[in-house]
Image (tube, rainbow, N blue to C red):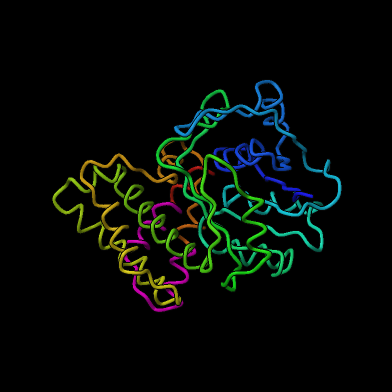
């Protein structure tokens, strides 16, 4: 008997992984809002992908329409939508349910554990380049996407391995991590540095790196993020740090952060989850972060103007 999987959200991330898992024969249901439900009923869940296109007719429910608990909940919403999402999927959580969140930052782990109990919440992270186009199709580009999951206390357990097996399919790699919290901090350092570079300077990685002081600026913000991670007990390995520096100082790079792309569209940004929470932790650990402080201020003003 396969695991019953509920994918919360059928957007660029959850929609991609969920469609691939459904195509592989897993028992996948998508929890969606009414507008997305109608869109997917009309055209199916369509992936336009560098790994191969696929269209499925997804099994879907809306909040209030769920029957019984699910074995695994794959949570892939923007961090600022977490509270609303928890209320929506709460009826799907039973005593044996495991929640695998793919949100950015770290504070969602505590929020989920407070609501559903620490044992229910796994660690998780993913690497994927994808977006929704105007027709609601998921367009995935770049290298093979990766989904990493693990027990938050670390180590290798039968439960973690069975969840990794359930959350698998062609079109992405599933990693059963024995150090998932470190993986999540590694990604947080990358996202916070990338977000600061792009949002403060209003440009791509290459736009910034190709200017006289651009690479030094990028390295300074990476140092702030990495120093905070180390003080919190999650120092980046040398190879990981070098890889982050290399990625964020390329003069010809067109890479931008999702926060910057959202900002350009006058949309909500994950500022507090990616930047604000890191600044708070740095302050508590007495790590100076002048560039992150500026980014935090910049994005707070942006959000204030949005709501004015």
On screen, residue 120 versus residue 277, left or right, reads: right
Which residue is most to the top?
42
Which of 251/18 is in front? 18
Q: Is residue 8 visible?
A: yes
- From the top left corner, tell me how far across and down residue 186 is, in percent: 42, 63
Q: Is residue 51 above or below residue 216?
A: above
Magenta segment: does it hold 299? yes
Which of the two residues, 153 or 163, is positioned nearer the viewer here? 163
Place of residue 223 in the rendered image (x, y in percent of width and height, measured from the top left): 30, 66
Q: Position of residue 139 (x, y in %)?
A: 49, 31
The picture quadrant where one finds residue 124 is bottom right
The residue sitting at 64% across, 35% down in the picture is 23
Number of numbered callouts drawn: 0
Residue 65 painted magenta: no
- Residue in the picture at 52% in, 39% down: 171
Highlighted range, magenta: 277-300
Place residue 25 in its image quadrant.
top right
Q: Is residue 33 above or below residue 280?
A: above
x 76%, y 48%: residue: 4
* Foreground pick, 31 / 260: 31
Q: In the image, what residue occupies the spot 75% across and 52% down?
A: 87
Q: Position of residue 181 (x, y in %)?
A: 52, 67
Secondary structure mostly taken by the magenta-highlighted segment of the chain: helix
| 136 with respect to 31 (left or right) | left
């Amino acid at each position: 008997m396969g695991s019953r999987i509920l994918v919360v959200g059928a957007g660029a991330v959850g929609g991609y992984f969920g469609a691939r898992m459904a195509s592989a024969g897993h028992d996948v249901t998508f929890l969606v809002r009414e507008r997305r439900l109608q869109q997917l009923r009309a055209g199916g869940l369509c992936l336009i992908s560098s790994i191969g296109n696929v269209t499925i007719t997804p099994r879907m429910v809306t909040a209030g329409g769920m029957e019984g608990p699910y074995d695994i909940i794959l949570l892939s919403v923007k961090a600022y939508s977490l509270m609303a999402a928890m209320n929506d999927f709460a009826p799907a959580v039973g005593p044996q349910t495991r929640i695998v969140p793919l949100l950015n930052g770290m504070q969602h782990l505590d929020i989920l554990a407070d609501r559903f109990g620490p044992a229910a919440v796994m660690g998780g992270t993913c690497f994927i380049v994808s977006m929704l186009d105007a027709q609601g199709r998921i367009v995935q580009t770049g290298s093979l996407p990766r989904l990493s999951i693990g027990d938050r206390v670390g180590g290798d357990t039968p439960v973690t391995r069975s969840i990794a097996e359930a959350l698998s399919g062609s079109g992405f790699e599933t990693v059963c991590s024995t150090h998932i919290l470190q993986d999540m901090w590694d990604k947080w350092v990358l996202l916070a540095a990338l977000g600061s570079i792009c949002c403060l300077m209003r440009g791509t990685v290459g736009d910034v790196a190709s200017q006289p002081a651009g690479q030094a600026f990028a390295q300074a913000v990476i140092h702030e993020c990495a120093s905070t991670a180390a003080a919190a007990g999650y120092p980046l390995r040398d190879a990981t740090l070098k890889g982050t520096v290399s990625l964020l100082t390329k003069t010809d790079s067109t890479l931008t952060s999702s926060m910057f792309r959202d900002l350009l569209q006058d949309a909500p940004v994950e500022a507090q989850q990616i930047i604000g929470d890191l600044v708070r932790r740095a302050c508590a650990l007495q790590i100076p972060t002048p560039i992150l402080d500026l980014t935090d201020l910049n994005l707070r003003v942006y959000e204030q103007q949005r709501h004015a």
